[in-house]
Image (cartoon, rainbow, N blue to C red):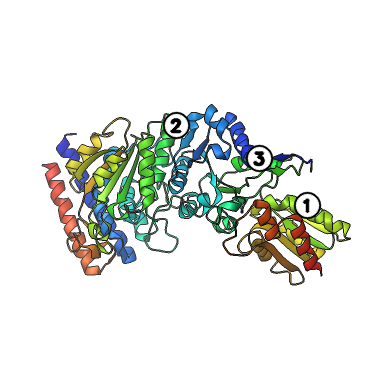
Amino acid sequence: MTGEFIDPRKEFGKTVTELAKDNEDIVVFSADSGKSSGFGDFIEKYPERYYECGIMEQGVVGLAAGMATAGKIPVFCAIAPFVTCRPYEMVRNDMGYMRQNVKIVGRNCGFTYSDLGATHQSLDDFGLMRLIPGMVVLAPQDPAEIRQGVKAMIDYQGPVYMRIGNPKIPVLFEEKPFEIGKGTVLREGTDLTLITTGSVTGAAIEAAEVMEREGVSVELIGMPTVCPVDEKLVKASAAKTKKVLTVEEHYLDGGLGTIITEVLSGMSDVFVRRHGVPKLYATTGSYEQLLDYYKLDAKGIAGVIREVLA
Amino acid sequence: MTDKTRILKLKIAAAKSRRNVLRMIKASGHGHVGGALSAIDLVTALYFDKMKIDPSDPGKPDRDRFLLSAGHKCLAQYSVMAQRGYMDQSVLDTYGSFKACIPGHPDMHKLPGVEANTGALGHGMSIAAGMAMSAKLDKEDFCVYAVTGDGELPEGSNWEAAAAAGKFGLDNLTVFVDNNGLQISGKVTDVMSMEDIKDKFRAFGWAVAEIDGNDMEQIVQVLDRLPLQKGKPNMILCHTVKAKGLSIGEGKAGYHFWNAKPEELAAADRELEEQIEKLTKELEA
């Protein structure tokens, strides 16, 4: 960690704009959501490739799929529930079933819209998107991974859902190519495997450091591709530590924890615990208050690790 | 070709398309015939008279695109595509069979030439508009033709597409509303009336025309007029008869989906055969 914090939306929009310079197939759709998705520069530079559609997410997914059939690479970013729950059937059929090269990006994911309530929070997007056959689900964990993840997403031929947050996020990693479907061992350990994704990874790293000071050796795996998950890496680490804890800013049901549990279901000697948000309409408050309340900050995650090892 | 010859040839093609529908129903025992037969004259005219297509190269980038928003009308599309050479006519006998490339709703990955996987209603207009947007962006001159059912118009997503097509000035997009007036539960105007359909599209910035969608002469005339107005998407309100050409089912909501009896099929096929003979004599005269 460098101590630097960067706005994920700006990083996302900036990267798409940079890629659009050499890739004329990239088009951007907005449902009154372009500027807040970091596309200010794109609008200036490539107005002919920017489609402001107003608030019509179902329509946008269909329009994007239609453009993709003719070789375009549409990128559509808006508040996470509005690109997942709202147009779900369009994503499932027009993108998924039709196998179209459309990229949808849910921003302000998890409960980063903490005080706006459950309509604007997105704690089910991993679950919804991973059930669509062929859909890649990405949750980059820091600004460098957003940049590299966007490049990988554009290079990948097929439908992709990426989730990013809203508040500034810490720089965690050196810049390196993003490989879809691959996780990374962020620190090696022997007592427990902690698997993290997306916005909570900074807190997970801190929690692992706290536990190390208490004499607990945590193997930390960062999993920026939620689907298809890196099964090989998960199984190898689980075989070593025999205890796996997953952590995510998502419902306990349907997300990374569920996926990891499925992967490990054949390993009877491995204990798995999922940590996330209970399946209810989350409460409101500041983002920090919600992370604290649902034990998704470093202190909370460390506490869950202690419970698992007790 | 004189206009009369052109029309007669298309009428014969449409009757043959209808026979192909019966052939598929014979293979599977059932299917969505009502909407297929109401739209089939128009679909025939598009594939045989209007669209810039090459069945031997169905993915050609500059081809015109056709898609059914009402995917359950696919019997119309398959029957015309088979006649037009996209597949061998014998493929029609696989309708309803295991792993058929002509399933109960069209699948672009199973049958080359199908442009979209429709069936869930209210999707096609957006997809078609997206295709038309791509043509505009690339300054390509291909056109996109989509057929919607009148029964699917209450789906809100249609109106999202209508607004976008109007805003982006997609005069290379034509949507045909197959206004047969009937859906599973009865009259469209009783179930959920979307009248006045023309005014609604006009309000979204579309150019509008209205025809008898089972009258080949009117179909050809309106196709010749496209685009109706530069800079505006086109909506053709096609007044049609459900199950047109199947005398026992014409104008009956119950024939939206038909579980056919062999003797009914045989009688319907004989009628069409006679119609084709009559039209052929007229053409040769």
- Separation (CA) of disc 3 from disc 1: 20 Å
Residue B57 in view (yes/no) = no
- Which class describes the residues within 10 Å of circle 2: few (<14), some (14-19), or many (20+)? few
Vertical order, A68 against B102 (above or below) = above
Q: Residue at x 65, y 54 (%)?
A: A226
Residue type marked 3: Asp
Residue at 70% across / 55% down in the picture? A230
Q: Which quadrant holds residue A66?
A: top left
Image spot of residue A185 (x, y percent): 78, 52
Q: Point out which mark residue A304 bears.
A: none
Question: Residue A186, position in %: x, y?
Answer: 79, 51
C-alpha separation, residue under disc 2 versus residue under disc 1: 46 Å
A269 vs A300: above or below: below
Question: Mark 3, mark 1: which one is toward the viewer?
Answer: 3
The residue that label 2 is drawn on is B137
Q: CA distance from mark 2 to mark 3?
A: 32 Å
Q: Which residue is mark 1?
A: A205
Q: Amino acid at mark 2?
A: Leu
Name the residue: 65% across, 42% down.
A8
Residue toward you, B66 or A270:
A270
The quarter in which the C terminus of chain B is drawn is top left
Which residue of the protein is positioned furthest toward the bottom in this rendering? A268
Q: Quadrant of residue A177?
A: top right
Between circles 2 and 1, the one closer to the viewer is 1
Q: Is residue A304 left or right of residue B148?
A: right
Label disc, if present, on residue A7 of the rendered structure: 3
Number of callouts: 3
A189 sits left or right of A23 in the view: right
Q: Chain of mark 2?
A: B
Residue nearest the observer in this picture, B266 or A276? A276
Q: Are marks 3 and 1 in contact (CB under 8 Å)?
A: no
